[in-house]
Amino acid sequence: MTTATLYKTQLIKHCIEAASTIHDECAKILSAKDQYDPVVITETSLAGCGPALVDLLSRQANIVHSLYQNEGQTASSKVIITDQEETRTLQIYNLALKRLEDIASIAYTKFYAYLFKDLPVYWRQLYTDARILKFCLLLLRSPYTIQREPDIGSCHDAVASTHKHDCLDELVRTLDLALILAGAAGERTGRGWIDRALELLRLIWVAESEDGKTSADDDNRPSKRAKLVEDLVASNTGDGRVPIATFSTNEPFTPPVTHPIKKLEALSIDEFQTYMDRPGDPKLGPGPLIIRNSLNEWPALSTHPWNRPSYLLSQTFGGRRLVPVEIGRSYVDEGWGQKLITFGEFMREYIDHTSCSPVSSNRISNNTQLNPEPHNSTTPPHKPTAYLAQHQLFTQLPSLRNDILIPDYCYTLPPPHPTDPSIAQPELSAPLLNAWFGPPGTISPLHNDPYHNVLAQVVGRKYVRLYAPLFVSRLAARGRENGVEMGNTSTLDVGVLEGWDERAGEDGGELENAEAIEEKIAEFKALPFVDCILEPGDALYIPIGWWHYVRGLSVSFSVSFWWN
């Protein structure tokens, strides 16, 4: 038995268990005697979706389980299936796929009726279960199961190669939708099941590449270990290019640092606690601080280098993983939006046009299409800025989570908000981690957060400016906008007021006359602030309540750690 076959066997078993688990949970709900049955009144129970939807999900789970059992029996007994039987099975398969898509669609419409924090868990679980069952169905008729493994002679056929690419794309996408949109809700399946399924699929992908079974698929060959080498790693970016060694460090614009933030070499946890306990201004509390060389143990800065596109692609199924990105210069600008795209598309289209080089036609996989125009790294086509911002990427991609360490500073006892203790949030059981990955020019507008923050810089450089919470009345905080509370964000656009950016107001320059604009600029520039440029390996401590403006100078990857 090959390594790939071993993992395929485990993944098939994993899918059978999921179908059985979902069917059993639905059956218990449907067999409950009344609405006061403990099974029904459980807060997370699927019963909240109503008996009709629970019954529909139950029937699809039963179909998935039956199809797997029939497929296994057919493969083991080598019984010849007639065309009529195959047609009937295919009809059942396609109808189940449609029903599961209907269930997911119904569940997703409920997401718009609530703020996500108020969305009943059962709608999230219904969506997740439907996606899990769809994954199981797609896998059943894909090249990634034992039963459907193609003949060796057809593995290199253009159609077979394209089919395999498409199958992998859809399998990964199906589970990523459950992770990103529904938070992979569910106690018995949910995130744990999805993480294991994706890991087994990745192991199959790796094993088949190493076994040479997909030699025509060289552009998607994953890297089993990160290697500090200068040669190209053939990871698929979706258009026949392969990444060069490291991201570009080019900075189109670099603001001057005029009021530098204090810097200290790596502090011990006790030294950092002392820094917070003994501030220079007790009324204000501890100020921002740059801590140098405190991230030296991170694999992301050494053995698993995030500044190499090839490594990031190898950890995202050759760029196939879905990520939510913000489109637009800043989340307060007109026209700003969000969309889900693959990590490879995000890298190729938005991150760094110099990080991918064209490859010869014999290195292009059959399902990609080479841009007919020659790639010109100096004059990339104009696109709006895209930013993977404040996304819990490390929950979605545990392999990248293993490349970073939570700073010890996040386990200290920080002071309360210096001016408004009511802003304090309930105590976190663990620090909140978020990823910030984008091209030059990404902007987080002037805002404040309800937690203490350690902002760790991994790739590239960022400019950060901070204003003390004592000046909140002069920072022109927003209010409620379109039903969303925006009081933690300022109406002041630092880039525009400093002359670094053009005004992006709804009515252009007619919003205010020149005299009023000059007055606003003068008032803004009179406010004291501190600023810095974060380098790779730097950690910036941002105390709770401090207003901060963050600007990506080059391709940049940062990690924030909120704690209280």
Image (cartoon, rainbow, N blue to C red):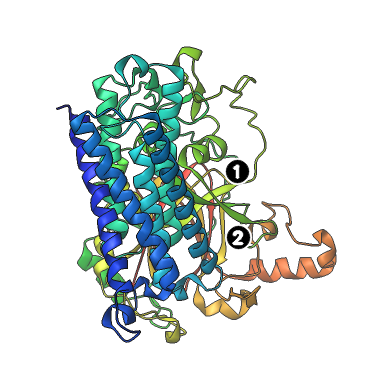
Contact flag, marks 1 and 2 (Cβ < 8 Å): no
Asked if residue 331 lies left or right of residue 321, the reply is right
What residue would you read off at disc 1?
253
- Residues 413 and 7: in front is 7
- Residues 312 and 21: in front is 21
Amino acid beneath label 1 = Phe
Percent coordinates x, y for residue 283 in the rendering: 42, 83
- Residues 20 and 393: in front is 20
Numbered disc 1: secondary structure: loop
Q: From this view, report whether residue 537 is shown above or below residue 106.
A: above
Percent coordinates x, y for residue 257 in the rendering: 53, 53
Q: Earlier in the sequence, mark 1 or mark 2?
A: 1
Q: Is residue 402 visible?
A: no
Numbered disc 2: secondary structure: loop
Q: Residue at x 71, y 66 (%)?
A: 521
Q: Residue at x 57, y 65 (%)?
A: 446
Percent coordinates x, y for residue 502 in the rendering: 73, 52
Q: CA distance from mark 1 to mark 2?
A: 20 Å
Asked if residue 146 lies left or right of residue 516, the reply is left
What residue would you read off at disc 2?
331
Percent coordinates x, y for residue 361 in the rendering: 50, 14
Q: Which quadrant holds the C terminus? A: bottom left
Mark 2 nearby-residue class (10 Å; few <14, some 14–19, many ≥20): some
Q: Residue at x 41, y 80 (%)?
A: 417
Q: Residue at x 31, y 33 (%)?
A: 144
Q: From this view, report whether residue 426 is shown above or below residue 398.
A: below
Answer with the quarter of the image where residue 124 lies.
Answer: bottom left
Q: Which quadrant holds the N terminus? A: top left
Answer with the quarter of the image where residue 491 lies.
Answer: bottom right
Amino acid beneath label 2 = Tyr
